[in-house]
Amino acid sequence: MAYADYDYYKDVFKGELEEDKATKLLEEASDQVDRLTHGRIRSKGFDNLTEFQQANVKKAVCYQAEFIDKYSEYLNMPINGYSAGDISLSFSEENKGPGGITADKKTLDYLSQTGLTSRRL
C-alpha cells in the first residue's frame, strides 16, 4: 500500500504524472521510503504516526516517485560515473540513504524531519 494515493499526489502535491504511472511509482516510492526508514512506518503502522510525520512521509513519497520517474534509467546503472573526452559525469553519494537507496534530496529531508531515519531508534 502506498503512503500517498493518487488523489493526494494530484490535488495536494500538484503532481503531473498520469494516474496509472503515478500509482505504480507511488507504490515503488513507498517501498523505498520503508527501506529509508528501516521499516519503522510498517512496524508502527502509518495511522499511528503523528500528523506531522504522516504529512512528511506523504511528501517524501511524492518527491521520490517523481525522482524515480525522472532518473530510473540511471538509478540501476552498475557504474557511478563515466567520462568521454572533455565530458565527465559522476553520481553523488549524498543522495544515498539506508539500504543503498538513491533518493531525491527533498525525500531525504522530509524523512529526516520525522525522526524515523535514525539508526539509533
Image (cartoon, grey):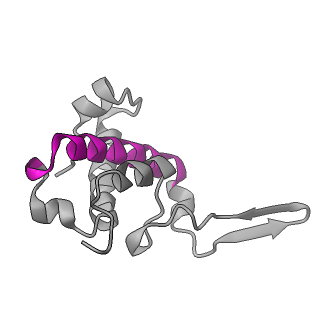
Residue 20's place in the image compared with 94, above or below, is above
Q: Position of residue 100 (x, y in %)?
A: 44, 73
Query: Furthest residue to the top?
Result: 11
Q: Residue at x 48, y 63 (%)?
A: 102
Q: Is residue 30 left or right of residue 49?
A: right
Q: Position of residue 111 (x, y in %)?
A: 35, 53
Residue 112's place in the image compared with 98, above or below, is above
In depth, the one of 46 and 70 nearer the eye is 46
Magenta residues span: 47-71
Q: Quadrant of residue 31?
A: bottom left
In depth, the one of 92 and 73 nearer the eye is 92
In depth, the one of 31 and 55 nearer the eye is 55
Q: Residue at x 75, y 69 (%)?
A: 82
Query: Furthest residue to the right?
Result: 86
Q: Quadrant of residue 9?
A: top left
Q: Is residue 60 magenta?
A: yes
